[in-house]
């Protein structure tokens, strides 16, 4: 009797352990689902530039064998990364990030097959990046304009972006030239003292006016409400050329 009870107890403990293991496995974040590109594309030739070398592979390795992942977050356009992302996150054609990327919440975020991760992303940051990338691909804001110019997150952020991140002026000026150049570019003809890049406020953060993922806003108008000043991708005229110095009638 005692021996039979002992055997049953061992069996029950073993089954309980299996259940706990299975439950723990089900709670793990989904691993990268390496799908063959040919599940959506019949061939690569129609997707690549005319002079691009022939690609024989079926998955991401066919690209990364030549386009080696570059973890440096430099302030410059990256055509390969931008075009690849834009092609897979258009509205109605969104591909889940984890088809190509690997992610362990709070530990590592990287690219399948890459030796080093790009950084760390919490669940909150990952959710935010998914929304931001969708905006970057198709919004009417400054982010989508950068996307068309092949500028990805890395072009503005020095690391994997996190919720609440800001972009420093030196990142903007790396592409847009010196502040002196911008001052000349936006010099108003009628009212020289109304130059948005040379005001009585001195040097301020570019992001005070130029918003990436929401409509940009001319900060001067918070006080000077009778000025007629427009900003590219702003609240009044998305994509309009910036003007300054005209006074409303």
Image (cartoon, helix red, strand yellow):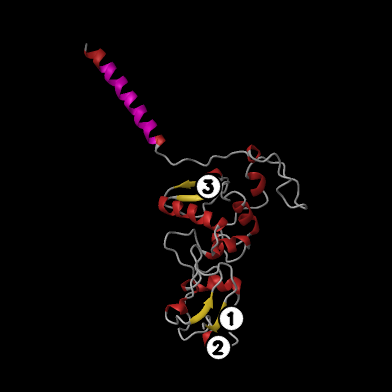
Residue 84's place in the image compared with 211, above or below, is: above
Q: Who's the residue at 65% across and 52% down the image?
A: 67
Give the CA distance from mark 1 to mark 3.
Answer: 39 Å
- The quadrant of the image that shows the N terminus is top left
Q: Is 79 in the magenta?
A: no
Residue drawn at x 49%, y 84% as measured from the top left: 199
Please tell me how many numbered marks the rendered image carries.
3
Is residue 180 at least partly visible in the picture? yes
- Give the residue at mark 1: 186
Nearer the N terminus, badge 2 or badge 3?
3
Q: Nearer the observer, disc 1 or disc 2?
A: 2
For the residues marked 2 and 3, what is the alpha-carbon distance in whole angstroms? 49 Å
Between label 1 and label 3, give the one nearer the viewer: 1
User: Which disc is residue 191 wearing?
Assistant: 2
**Horizontal and vertical percent for residue 207?**
48, 71
Q: Residue 40 appears at what percent x and percent y?
A: 64, 40
Q: Is residue 80 left or right of residue 54?
A: left
Residue holding disc 3? 97
In this view of the protein, which residue sits in the foreground, 227 or 128?
Answer: 227
User: Helix, strand, or loop for circle 1?
Assistant: loop
- The stretch in magenta equals 6-24
Q: Position of residue 154 (x, y in %)?
A: 55, 61
């Amino acid at each position: 009797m005692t021996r039979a009870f002992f055997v049953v107890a061992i069996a029950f403990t073993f089954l309980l352990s299996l259940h706990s293991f299975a439950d723990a496995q089900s709670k793990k974040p989904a691993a990268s689902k390496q799908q063959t590109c040919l599940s959506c594309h019949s061939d690569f030739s129609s997707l690549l530039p005319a002079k691009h070398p022939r690609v024989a592979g079926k998955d991401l390795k066919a690209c990364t064998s030549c386009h080696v992942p570059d973890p440096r977050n430099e302030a410059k356009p990256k055509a390969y990364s931008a075009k690849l992302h834009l092609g897979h996150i258009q509205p109605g054609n969104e591909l889940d990030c984890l088809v190509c990327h690997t992610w362990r919440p709070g530990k590592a975020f990287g690219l399948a097959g890459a030796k080093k991760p790009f950084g760390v992303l919490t669940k909150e940051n990952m959710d935010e990046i998914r929304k931001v990338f969708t905006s970057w691909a198709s919004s009417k804001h400054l982010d989508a304009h950068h996307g068309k110019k092949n500028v990805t997150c890395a072009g503005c952020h020095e690391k994997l972006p996190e919720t609440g991140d800001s972009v420093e002026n030196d990142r903007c000026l790396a592409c847009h030239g010196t502040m002196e150049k911008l001052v000349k570019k936006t010099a108003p003809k009628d009212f020289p003292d109304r130059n948005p890049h040379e005001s009585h406020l001195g040097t301020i953060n570019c992001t005070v006016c130029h918003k990436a993922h929401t409509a940009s806003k001319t900060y001067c108008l918070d006080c000077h409400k009778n000025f007629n000043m427009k900003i590219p991708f702003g609240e009044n005229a998305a994509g309009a050329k910036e003007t300054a110095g005209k006074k409303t009638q």
